[in-house]
Every structure is written in C-alpha cells, then in structure tokens.
Amino acid sequence: LQTPIKKLTTMISHQIINMPYILVEYKPAFGHIFADYLKDYSHWGYSDLDVVLGDMTRWISNEEWNDYDIVTYGFGDQDKLYLRGQFTFHKNDPKYINQLWRDCKYLSEMDVRYAHPEKLKFESAEGCYSKAVITKTDLKVKWAVKAFSDVKEGSSIYAHGMYLSLGKDSYSPRSVLYTASNVHAGDKLLSLPHDWFQDTSRYKLYSQTDVPIQEYVGEKTKVETYRTLYNRNLDESLKDIKCMYWAPQTYQMDICTVNGNVGGNEVVTLENGVLWKQRFETTRDGMFPEGIVSFPFFHFQEWKRVYRSTQLLNSHNIRQANVPGVIIT
C-alpha cells in the first residue's frame, strides 16, 4: 500500500466527519460495504437526502425487478446516460454486480489516491461508475423516465405545489406523490380526495400492481453515443465533448448520447453491450384521476436552496401527527 492502512483509515474518517457529502463517492460500493446487511435482500440501491419517496413499490415494475441488473430513474434527461444518484437500484449479486465499483480507481486504489492528499478532488460516482457499467457487455441496464423535480419553472408544482398523501390507516405504509398535470388543472387537485388511490372502483388499474404504469410504444432502435460515433469516423474533436459539468471529461464520450439522439419520452436500455431506446406512454385510463400526474419520488434540486432548515420541520414524523398528508410548495 502506498498509504498505510491505519493512516488511510484515519484520513478517510477525518474527511467524512468534516465533509459528510463525500459519502456520495462511495455509493457504487454500498452493495459491497454493507454486504452483511444485504444477505436476505434481492436488491440494493441508493438515493439522496434531497428526495421525497412516494409509492415506490407501485412504480417499480416486475420487468425492472426481474429482467435488469441495474435500473436508474431520471426525469427526461436520459440523453446523459449516467446512473442517477437520486435513485438507482441493483440486483444483489455479491460476486459480480456488487463489485463493479472496482473499475473506478478512485475507489479501488484509495491508498494511491490518499498518498497525495494535497491533490484530492471530489469525484462524482455518476461519472466513473456510469462508464464502468455502460462499457460492460454482460449487463442489462435500464434508464427509465419516472422521476419528478423542480428544475423546470413552468412545471405545475410552481403553481399548485406537490401533494404527499398517506392514505387511510390500513394503507399506512403507502405514500403517494402527485400534482396537477398542468398549470391550468389546479381545480382537479382541490376537488380530489386525498386517498383517491384507494378507490379501486374508479382507479382500479392503480391497485393492480401487475399492470405497469408505463407501457412501451413502437419498436426499439439503437442509441448512439459519442464513443460509438468516434469509433466510426475517428473524429478527434469528439474527445472534447461534454454534456455533464459535474463529471470528469474522460468519461463523457461513453455517457453522452449524440445530440438529439434520445428524446425525453424514450427509455434507454443496455443489452449485451448494445444501447437501445424505445418510446413509452403512461397508462392513463383507470390509472390516475383526470388532470393529475403522479410520480415515484420528488427531487428537490432548486427549492432546497431557498428553504430554511425549520420550514420543513412540520412535515417530520407526519404519520404520528394523524394528518392525511402534506402539501409542499
């Protein structure tokens, strides 16, 4: 070891204590780090602190549970093929999938990295780990479009807020996130019972967990990244491509799809080393109320910058407060 194990442990511990955010670097290795706790589980994953989770078990489809090694949820920006820190889950395979992080030297060669602490820089797992996965030929990976965030100011949440409903007592483990489907549908929210998703006569498809919320439409077609484009024409200028400001340049040719190649309404999959895309539609009739859009989780990307820490205290432990839910604006 270039850095003795005792010194390395001390340095890493000190870094985590003084800059807890550094823990996000270790996300790809969680399946290995917490192996003893995962023995009885089929999957493991990671999320972020600025995420509110909704009815996740209803949104994760049987196909995602059974057919894919890794699944990640984005909000329509899957033209950038990184594994999202806000929500990515893996099959619990201790010998292979849980060891994919070893292709990232910043994790697998930490003794080398910490031998020069003056050169230490934050390393986003969304860069290296995404490239490590996307360059494999024996994995099945899915980039789904299911997340919801506050990135777009024209979104209905800016006009009507985000609703988090807990349902009735018999459904206490279930929490459902929803809002108006557009800025003009606010009246639909106001007239909607907070436990609408338990009305199996009107929204029977939502209660049928074997019916996916999203359905594929049309045929699959291949996706082109700047790496595949470079391999065809050896254009050296493609090495300068950058579609993600938070990931090092060296990973971007593999992660960035050619401009305009993937739309916001297309799911991307990796199968046998080949990237595919396919359009999807949300099952509407009998799934959600008219004028309402639901989602598995909400990502506070912008709002968190203006909240004071005390503003969300009332939403803590709301299950014990005997309230039907909260509205966050």
Image (cartoon, rainbow, N blue to C red):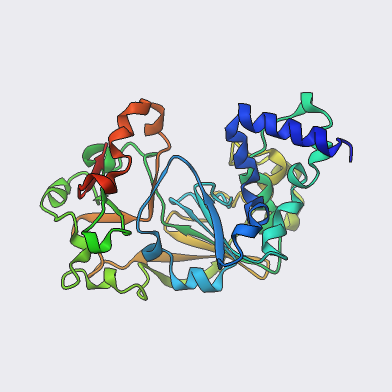
Q: Position of residue 317 (x, y in %)?
A: 32, 43
What residue appears at the point 41 percent right and 71 percent down from the top-left corner?
Answer: 217
Where does the N terminus fall, quadrant-wise? Answer: top right
Query: Is residue 271 visible to the viewer in this orientation of the structure?
Result: yes
* Near-viewer residue (298 or 110): 110
Say left or right for 173 vs 5: left
Q: Position of residue 283 (x, y in %)?
A: 31, 68
Q: How many numbered discs?
A: 0
Say left or right for 114 vs 101: right
Where does the C terminus fall, quadrant-wise? Answer: top left
Which residue, as the protein is rendered here, is positioned at the far right?
A: 2
Query: Is residue 228 visible to the viewer in this orientation of the structure?
Result: no
Question: Against 17, is 186 above or below?
Answer: below
What residue appears at the point 49 percent right and 47 percent down from the top-left corner?
Answer: 86
Q: Position of residue 309 (x, y in %)?
A: 37, 27
What residue appears at the point 27 percent right and 52 percent down from the top-left corner?
Answer: 178
- Quarter of the rendering containing residue 68: bottom right
* Near-viewer residue (48 or 187): 48
* Near-viewer residue (252 or 117): 117
Question: Against 33, is 14 above or below?
Answer: above
Q: Position of residue 189 (x, y in %)?
A: 16, 50
